[in-house]
Amino acid sequence: MNCLLILTVLLSVLWSSSSAGESKPNFLIIIADDLCWRDLGYEGSPDVKTPNLDKLRSESMHLKGMFNPATSCSPTRHSLYTGLYPIRSGAYPNHTRVYDGTKSLFTHLNTAGYRVALQNKTHVGPPASFPFEHMDGADDLTVTTAFVTRDAVQPWFMVFASNDPHSPWTRGPKYDPAKITVPPYLHDNAITRDALAKYFGEISKLDEQVGALMKLLADTNQSENTVVLFVSEQGSSFPYGGKWSVYDNGIHSSAILRWPGKVKPGSSTSALMQYVDVTPTFLAAAGIDPTKIDVGCPDASGATGFDGRSFLPVLLGETDTHRDHIFAQHTTIGTNGAIGPYPMRAVRDTRYKLIRNLTPDLTYTIGGIHKGEPLDSWKADAAQDYQLAERVKWLFNRPVEELYDLQADPYEFKNLAADPALVEIKAKLQKELDAWIIQQGDQGLETEKLANTRQGKSDESEPKAPKKGKGKSKKKVE
Ligand SMILES: [Ca+2]
């Protein structure tokens, strides 16, 4: 250990002497796993202790309008690393991969001279599209230290992909189930409380990892020249905790970005943005023009640029707006315990969200959330509680359209799709959603039925991307 420390100090001295001039920043993405954005100290959780993340937030810009386009592990990570929405890239069910030839942030930064790595949870493929060095484990930073100090001149990009707080919840400090606050979208009973307390413990475990990573940057004298982005990923696995739905508990992501000397510490923005915007933003921050990049996977019009767009001007405080709309989809085929398709498409602006359920006559049956101990206990309690019974039923059966006013109803309890006062708002959102669907080459249920072919490893029998147009348009659909 002493040797490692000496090596670290030596390399950091070397680093500081060689980085006097203007150099490209390093990039560190820290990604949680199955964390609902609300369950963090700095987001206002009354219970969860996240001192390291709270400190990081105080040094960062809080990106309060960040959304992800798919609330399961694999498609959301693909979108973050490629700048492409899931259906266009082919990575739309869980345990998926992008079409052969698709490039990622790892590819682009590697081409620009960066060394690139990912520690712990991968969930992306095929390897040719994600040419990172893979480092196992998340609790031991020996390999991380070796990676970030390997070469004092070459810039680096790494993703630290924690497994916390993904279930089973077995790690971290103990929280007292009797003393925690059960949020209004969960049913309050002893089993929910017990599970929540364990989940909170794993969030604190994640927080310890964040503290260790920030200490590593400081110890190696790289705090000043490293862009750090933390994202909460895509919702917890409680019923209505967000995962496997397109409700805000799932698609809204807690996101904070630290970049000393460039991004104002303790600042915040409400600008709407998505995971697909992160890759072009990082390229712009590295001095690479993202609008000139060929992503290796054309959209339905034949355009080869990113779906996302750089929000660097927001980070630099030059503007406080970015997108007018964000989009999301959910594919159930291929998800653990799924029986039949129950696909969703959604569009959201700063206030309203429209959701389309493509098979409303079927039943949304899925593992984990729609089965298991918390939900069984909710069902038992629902025998005496009509409102809870309705709430449980909604998990399995939803109407063809849902419309929510997030300003008045942040937990999406009241479906306003039939409200005559909102006809124009609904029509406008439908139009935006349709344009996105066309740009993505999304054939709805036909696309969903091909979900199984998008899973597993890439091989010789890899189906090619659907035939795309030949146009050269750089048109972005937001
Ligand atoms: Ca996850």
Image (cartoon, rainbow, N blue to C red):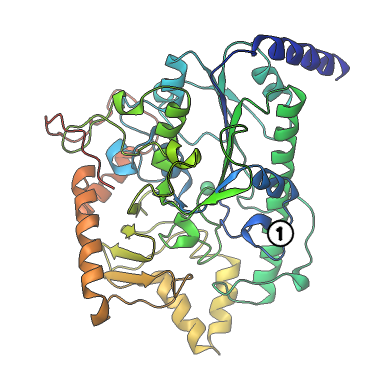
Q: Amino acid at mark 1?
A: Val
Residue 432 x, y percent position in the rendering? 23, 56
* Residue at mark 1: 48
Q: Is residue 341 visible?
A: no
| Residue 450, quarter of the rendered image | top left
Q: Nearer the viewer, residue 222 or 337?
A: 222
Q: Quadrant of the N terminus?
A: top right
Determine whether, in the image, residue 5 is placed left or right of residue 448.
Answer: right
- Ligand 1 within 8 Å of the CB at mark 1: no
How many other residues sit within 10 Å of disc 1, few (<14), some (14-19) or many (≥20)? many
Q: Nearer the viewer, residue 200 or 5?
A: 5
150 over 201 or under it: above or below? above
Residue at the image position 69 percent from the left and 22 percent from the top: 143
Residue 358 x, y percent position in the rendering? 26, 62
Judged from the image, the secondary structure of the residue bearing numbered disc 1 is: loop
| Residue 439, quarter of the rendered image | top left
Residue at the image position 45 percent from the left and 41 percent from the top: 318
34 over 26 or under it: above or below? below
User: Which residue is at the far right?
Assistant: 2
Determine whether, in the image, residue 114 is placed left or right of residue 328.
Answer: right
User: Which residue is at the far front?
Assistant: 318
Residue at the image position 47 percent from the left and 70 percent from the top: 410
Residue 390 x, y percent position in the rendering? 44, 82
Question: How many marks can you see?
Answer: 1
Residue 17 x, y percent position in the rendering? 70, 10
Q: Is residue 43 visible?
A: yes
